[in-house]
Amino acid sequence: MFTFNPFAALPASITPTAMQIYVIVMFLAVVFGTIADMLHKKSATYFFNHRETVAKRATREVGGGEKIAFAIQTVVVTGLAAGEFHTSSRRISHLLTMYGFIFYVVATALIVFAYPTAGSPAPAIVTGLWYLGAALICVGGYWFWFTLRVDVAAEGHSPFRLVRADLFIVSLLASASFALVWARLAAMDVAVWSHVFFVLYLLATTVLFGSVPWSKFAHMFYKPAAAFQRRIEQANGYRRNLPAPADRPATLGSARRPPRHY
């Protein structure tokens, strides 16, 4: 099954050109959706204004070599290793979902643009990467959804409670789940049901990439920039105008600790 290319088994009415146009449209939806999100929330304005404030209050200048080192550290620690998470379960769940998403998107693009038909069979490593990516998304995403979410693990809410902030993870899980079911049914040559799940796969994927201004999709672009900026601030001596955490009396428990990401 893992060498079966479901895109090559699509009806003749769905041409390779149509699939390629769809992928391009989804890519443009992410680009313009991220720009719209930045304009609406004024994220870029805040970021650049904050950088000017940091530069004015810095006690030392960070050199170019240090900035390169911080950039590499940000990519490796914050990006590739999810170092901002302090619990191993949350970090593993995030890494499974993140790498699954990368494999899933890259393999989809390769299949659609290079191997879209039965006459151009995709290498086993490409189709295998597509299945692996979708499976990793499901493992990491459902683990997070049912056990690790703050409103479930800490606040006791039902895992089936939905809010707008869940739009990204729900549409991502739906896209990967419907993709696997569609591929399995197509491999079994169950024509009607495979077409039904292909439509569901398209709908979920369209919501995933088309809802960027309203979901947390754009956060994956903001987080590395924010992490890099924090490293610059720690190095140049900038101190935020925040009150120092107060210690609780010994009779009331241990000293207060800074907030952590869970």
Image (cartoon, rainbow, N blue to C red):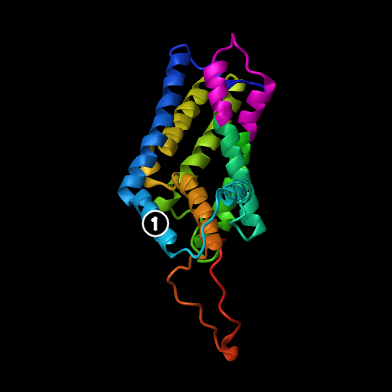
Query: In this rendering, is residue 171 above or below 14?
Result: below
**Place of residue 253 in the rendered image (x, y in percent of width and height, measured from the top left):** 59, 84
Q: Is residue 25 visible?
A: yes
Work out which residue is located at the far left of the displayed protein and give it.
Answer: 40
- Considering every residue shown, the one lying at the far top of the view is 119
Horizontal and vertical percent position of residue 181: 57, 31
- The residue under the point 61% across, 51% down is 82
Between 213 and 38, the residue placed more toward the observer is 38
- Amino acid of disc 1: Glu
The reply to whether residue 14 is visible in this rendering is no
Residue 227 percent coordinates (x, y)? 53, 54
Q: Residues within 10 Å of mark 1 (few under 14, many from 20)?
A: few
- The image shows residue 115 at horizontal and vertical percentages of 57, 16
Give the extent of the magenta segment: 106-132
Residue depicted at x 47% and y 11%: 12
Determine the residue positioned at 47% across, 63% down. 58
Q: Nearer the viewer, residue 55 or 139?
A: 55
**For the residue labelled by badge 1, is the local secondary structure a helix, a strand or a loop?**
helix
Quarter holding the N terminus is top right
Is residue 109 shown in magenta? yes
Residue holding disc 1: 52
Q: Is residue 108 magenta?
A: yes
Q: Is residue 160 left or right of residue 212?
A: right
Image position of 224 with respect to 205: above or below: below
